[in-house]
Image (spheres, helix red, strand yellow):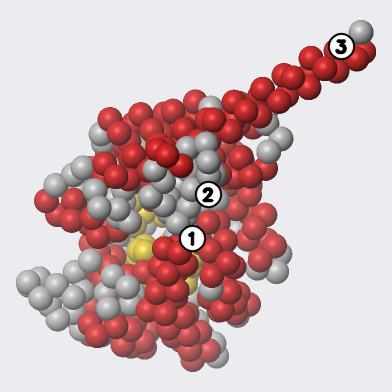
Amino acid sequence: MVSLCFYFQVHQPFRVKKYRIFDIGSSNNYFDEDKNRAIMNKVARKCYLPMNNLLLELINKYKSNDRKFKVAFSISGVALEQMKLYAPEVLESFQKLVETGYVELLTETYYHSLSFLYSKEEFKEQVEEHKKTIKKLFNGYEPKVFRNTELIYSNEVAKYVEGLGFEAILAEGWDTFLGWRSSNFVYKPVGCKKIKLLTKNYKLSDDIAFRFSNKAWEEWPLTVEKYVSWLNSVNGNGEVINLFMDYETFGEHQWEDTGIFEFMKKLPEEFLKHPDNDFVFPSEAVKKYPVRDELDIPFLISWADTERDLSAWLGNRMQQNSIKELFEIEKEIKEISDDKLIKDWKKLTTSDHFYYMCTKYWADGDVHKYFSAYDSPYDAYVYFMNAFNDVILRLREEQTKINENYKVQNLTEG
């Protein structure tokens, strides 16, 4: 028997606008509302709405089948905010999917941040904020599985997340740490007692996410029959195939004219022709199948770029310095009772801001350019730091007010 576990990441950042040095002190509107609205509406039209409709169709088609069609999502808090602001019909379509009972929601950091690396307190706050948001928007739904930003994972991450009460966590199935093992089994993180680990089958995932429309790929065109034959070959050599990918794969990264929607429409029927195949949620996979081994991943890994490390966000001085300075003021920011200031600071923790500052070359560099909202990594850095310096200015002004009020109060009491 082999189970197919689909997990899709849904995320859109609040992109920093072209915030000039002359704007510091005169405007605290850091985010490009026009661009964020335009991108959300474009992706909604090309991906979210048509793909959600397709998934709903598939769910209903197999609802009476012994082997149901199921998928899982992690939707960042900032993506949910933008859906509410710019495309409420998208949020409604996700709510409709979850109401079927055949969609699982995962938890992540609300702001899709790298907070675990810099502040466990902020990390925990963002996880709790995300859980509350999911519960509020999806009729009391409470996720059981955790997915860290960009699948950033290590033994330490798993141990901490276990302490937050999650039953399972996702990670990249990177060969360096899997060694002779296969990603197609359930594992237990070293040092943990209860939490289980699911690792992405990156080859089969990337065949859809990255190679599907590549005419230079030796396997192009990728037919449903060919792909399912690869899935079926896991029978006897694995128990759960974890296909993890960005949801924007469908219609945005792989355009509709590539046949990606038709591919997904036909896949369940072809996959279920094998009597031993079925679909599972991440939470079901870790209950259905036994732990086959402990997995030791002492260093931080991610699902990004060829290195599978954190260099996509922290590979140069611009990235390292900007995020370090951002988290250095965390304690002071949280001592100020200015909700907008705190919210703006938290929005700046989103990992995309640092991703846009990446200066890699070759294939990975092309990917970064594709996703960037700026003309260059240096522009991304300048606009981010200008916004950050205005946050500093607002912080100092608030601190001055507090100190002055404190002095006045003491004089009055004296």
Query: Is residue 164 at all visible to an observer of this figure?
Result: no
Residue 375, position as x, y percentages in the image: 25, 53
Residue 74, position as x, y percentages in the image: 49, 61
- Position of the N terminus by quadrant: bottom left
User: Label 3 vs label 1: CA separation?
Assistant: 45 Å
Q: Which residue is mark 2?
A: 29
Give the label on residue 195, or none.
none
User: Label 1 vs label 2: CA separation?
Assistant: 9 Å
Please tell me in which quadrant of the rendered image residue 237 appears.
bottom left
Image label count = 3
Taking the image as shown, residue 88 lies to the left or right of residue 196, namely right
Evaluate if marks 1 and 2 touch, with contact meaning CB atoms under 8 Å apart: yes
Query: Is residue 205 at all visible to an observer of this figure?
Result: yes
- Position of the C terminus by quadrant: top right
Residue at the spot 53% in from the left edge and 44% down from the top edge: 27
Residue at the spot 91% in from the left edge and 15% down from the top edge: 412
Taking the image as shown, residue 28 lies to the left or right of residue 365, namely right
**Looking at this view, is 172 or 258 the one in front?**
258
**Amino acid type, mark 2:** Asn
Q: Which residue is mark 3?
A: 411
